[in-house]
Image (cartoon, rainbow, N blue to C red):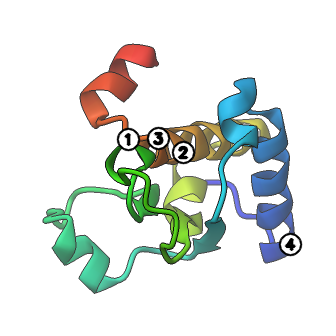
Amino acid sequence: MVEVSDEEFQRLIDQALTELPGEHAKNIKNVAILYEDAPTPEQRQQLALRHDQTLLGLYEGVPLSRRQGTTRLLPDKITLFRLPLQQHANTGDELKEQIKHTLWHEIAHYYGLDHDRISELE
């Protein structure tokens, strides 16, 4: 497990966002990207997660593919969960890559991709 300060974790998120390939990451709009230590009990319940399942990130909002031209929506939200991400990393480089991968995964949901399509692309 790798532990980093809140400031360092935010820096890693910011760095990951700038390093993501393609225009898709650069063109996200009206999305708050933040982090929490862990998912709330309500988030876990909403996703029907078992006690043995880990959640590294979560996209909450209306995917672009479902907006049908609607532009007046509340901001979408991508949350990265610091403690699970740290627990999945043995080195600082692994944590950096896990953050980058999780952020890419959640941005893919913003564009409307489901888990099957994301797995295909990975």
* Residue identifier under label 3: 111
* Residue identifier under label 1: 112
User: Disc 1 and disc 4: Cα gap in Å?
Assistant: 30 Å
Give above or below for 86 relative to 117: below
| Element at label 1 | loop
Packing grade of label 4 (10 A; few <14, some 14-19, many >=20) is few
Is residue 21 at least partly visible in the picture? no
The amino acid at mark 4 is Glu
Q: Position of residue 52 (x, y in %)?
A: 21, 59
* Residue identifier under label 2: 107
The amino acid at mark 1 is Gly
At 75% from the left edge and 55% from the top edge, which residue is drawn? 13
The amino acid at mark 3 is Tyr
User: Disc 2 and disc 1: Cα gap in Å?
Assistant: 9 Å
Q: Position of residue 85 (x, y in %)?
A: 55, 55
Q: Nearer the viewer, mark 1 or mark 4?
A: 1
Packing grade of label 2 (10 A; few <14, some 14-19, many >=20) is many
Q: Quadrant of residue 91?
A: top right
**Which sits earlier in the primary sequence, circle 1 or circle 4?**
4
**Which sits earlier in the primary sequence, circle 4 or circle 3?**
4
Whether pointer 2 and pointer 1 mark residues with C-beta atoms closer than 8 Å, the reply is no
* Residue identifier under label 4: 7
At 46% from the left edge and 74% from the top edge, which residue is drawn? 38
